[in-house]
Image (cartoon, grey):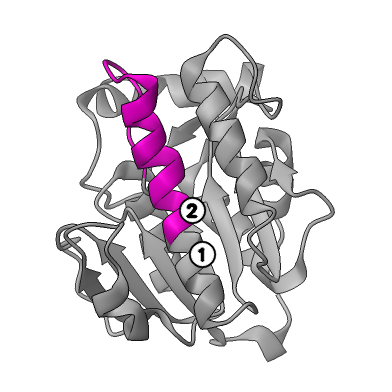
Amino acid sequence: MPQAQASSLRVIITGATGMVGEGVLLECLSHPAVAHVLSVSRKPCGVIHDKLRECIVADFLELDGISEQLAGYDACFFCAGVSSLGMSEAEYTRITYDVTLHFAQQLVRLGSQVSFVYVSGAQTDSSEKGRVMWARVKGRTENALQRVGFRKAYSFRPGAMRASPGQRNLKWYYTALSWLYPLLRATLPDHVSTLQVVARAMINAVLTGYPKQILEVKDINALGAIS
């Protein structure tokens, strides 16, 4: 990474109390290009660091009271999200589409020079017409984010991810199945990543750009390998 970029980025991260968000947060805090991180979440992330400030939000659809805290950032890594398991399409749409777009639109109103990286998922449906509910909703969200007006907008579609050292916000099955990662990496390299690589790819996307707006696992791994 060019020396000119050292300690220059001011980044917002949502979802730092989840697995993906926590992994991205830890990498940003250790990365030399990131000068400051604002974690926007419903509860404290439990991390203390000189680069980190937290903004606790009870409802992501009610941001007027904290809008000033969101100003002046170069990028947003939107890692917040939920599983669609047991949810109706209306419920999942509210959390996945409505919340994400509301947050994105608020950032653009504060300054359109922000870059936005949205954590989507493998097999997301860009046509918005497929049979799988969550994939349709994610595809609709991806498509809408391209129209918001960001300087750059990327949708990351990671597959299986290995957690970063020191992570605490992990589902039990990630810990139980972590031994499988080397095998998956050897046999299905374009379907797995580490969260360190995913986070580095986000940072590099903001710093240097990428020719695609939608990044599949292969793209993420290639971009995240650049140092």
Which residue is found at the position 27% from the left and 28% from the top?
A: 175
Q: Few, some or many C-alpha atoms within 10 Å of disc 2 (few <14, some 14-19, many ≥20)?
A: some
The answer for how far apart the CA atoms under marks 2 and 1 are is 6 Å
Depth order, front residue of 54/220: 54
Do the CB atoms of the residues marked 2 and 1 lie less than 8 Å apart? yes
Which residue is found at the position 53% from the left and 38% from the top?
A: 120
* Residue furthest to the right: 211
Q: Quadrant of residue 193?
A: top right
Residue 96 lies in magenta, yes or no? yes
Give the answer, above or below, for where 31 lies relative to 87. below
Tell me the number on the disc at residue 17: none
On the image, numbered disc 2 is attached to which residue? 101
Q: What residue type is labelled 2?
A: Leu
On the image, numbered disc 1 is attached to which residue? 105
Give the answer, above or below, for where 6 lies relative to 149. below
Q: Position of residue 179 (x, y in %)?
A: 38, 22
Which residue is found at the position 47% from the left and 74% from the top?
A: 11
Dot 2: element: helix
Start and end of the magenta stretch? 81-102
Q: What residue type is labelled 1?
A: Gln
Question: Relative to 127, is 195 on the left or the right?
Answer: left
In this rendering, the count of numbered labels is 2
Q: Quadrant of residue 121?
A: top right
Q: Where is residue 26 in the image (x, y as percent from the top left)?
A: 36, 62
Question: Relative to 57, is 150 on the left or the right?
Answer: right
Dot 1: element: helix
Q: Few, some or many C-alpha atoms within 10 Å of disc 1 (few <14, some 14-19, many ≥20)?
A: some
The majority secondary structure of the magenta stretch comes to: helix
